[in-house]
Image: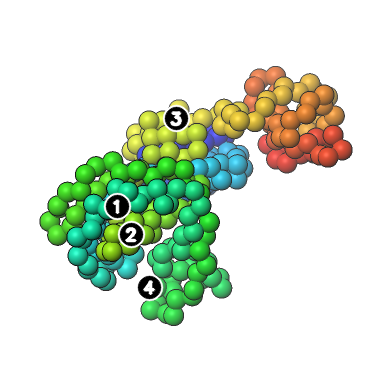
Amino acid sequence: MDGIVIINKPLNMSSHDCVNKVRKLFNTKKVGHSGTLDKAATGVLVLGINKGTKLLNYLNQDDKAYEFTVCFGKTTDTRDHEGVITETKPVANLKQLDGLTDRFIGEYNQVPPDYSAVKIAGKKMYQYARQNMVMPILEPRKITVFTLKKLTDFVQNNDCVEASFYVKSTKGLYVRQLAYDLALLCDTVGHTTRIHRVQAGQYNIDQATPLDLLETSSLIPMADVLNDLPKITLEPSQINRVKDGQMLLLDIQDDMIQCLNDLGDLIAIYRRHESGEYHAKNVFI
């Protein structure tokens, strides 16, 4: 039972809640995720099971994509619908947004929201906020935005003017803050009312299983996870060297490889040294 599962995280469950539920299903404590989702968000969450947790370091660098809805005209302390309203502002200039979303394409310097898990001096930002402490000043983080487009027209919804968007970016994007920054372009404020992750690396929402329908048969074997890395089937003598963590001499030139046994099981990941030798990066046997 080593590998990963792709779940569609439900609303109002934290990523840690999902981890706990999957631990019970697989009867193991060794479960982790490759990138947290807010409790108020839904969508693709990649979980590693047992030895599969060692693959998460390769997956948490992946690009992410989201669909999200923005309420323009008011914002909250958390930048989402669960927070306390802190400011309202007219929304007379929203139509100009149609020509401005391209400003975020490419390098986007984003300051994480106050209610985030970013750590400063050993304390998470949301802990400072919840304890009414002086908030540390955060430096902008460089995010690369590949795509940002509006999916729906602006619609009046009670006291909000709403529209939905799609964004694809490198890891680390706070969609809540992006919503606020979009509103600032229109001389107003905003917050998210919905965040749905539709892609995490090679996995999309169509491949995700609702958490309440997840079964152990949903497990993706370790050898089927890192599809961008070449696979090499080793001889018994080479496998013995892998067990001892020894280097391998292989007649290939790839920077990093997956080593399989004759059953097709992933037993190690090796990296090519500048000398031409392959050295163990992760061993799973």
Residue at 38%, 30% in the rendered image: 206
The CA distance from mark 1 to mark 4 is 33 Å
The CA distance from mark 3 to mark 2 is 43 Å
Circle 3 sits on which residue? 218
Q: Amino acid at mark 2?
A: Leu
- Indicate which label's residue lies in the foreground, 3 or 2: 2
Circle 4 sits on which residue? 130
- Indicate which label's residue lies in the foreground, 4 or 2: 2
Q: Is residue 285 above or below residue 68?
A: above
Q: Amino acid at mark 3?
A: Ser
Query: In the image, which disc is placed on residue 268?
Result: none
The CA distance from mark 4 to mark 2 is 28 Å
Left or right: where does residue 63 sit relative to residue 86? right
Residue at 56%, 32% in the rendered image: 225
Quadrant of the drawing holding the C terminus = top right
Q: Earlier in the sequence, mark 3 or mark 1?
A: 1
Q: Amino acid at mark 1?
A: Leu
Q: Secondary structure at mark 4?
A: helix
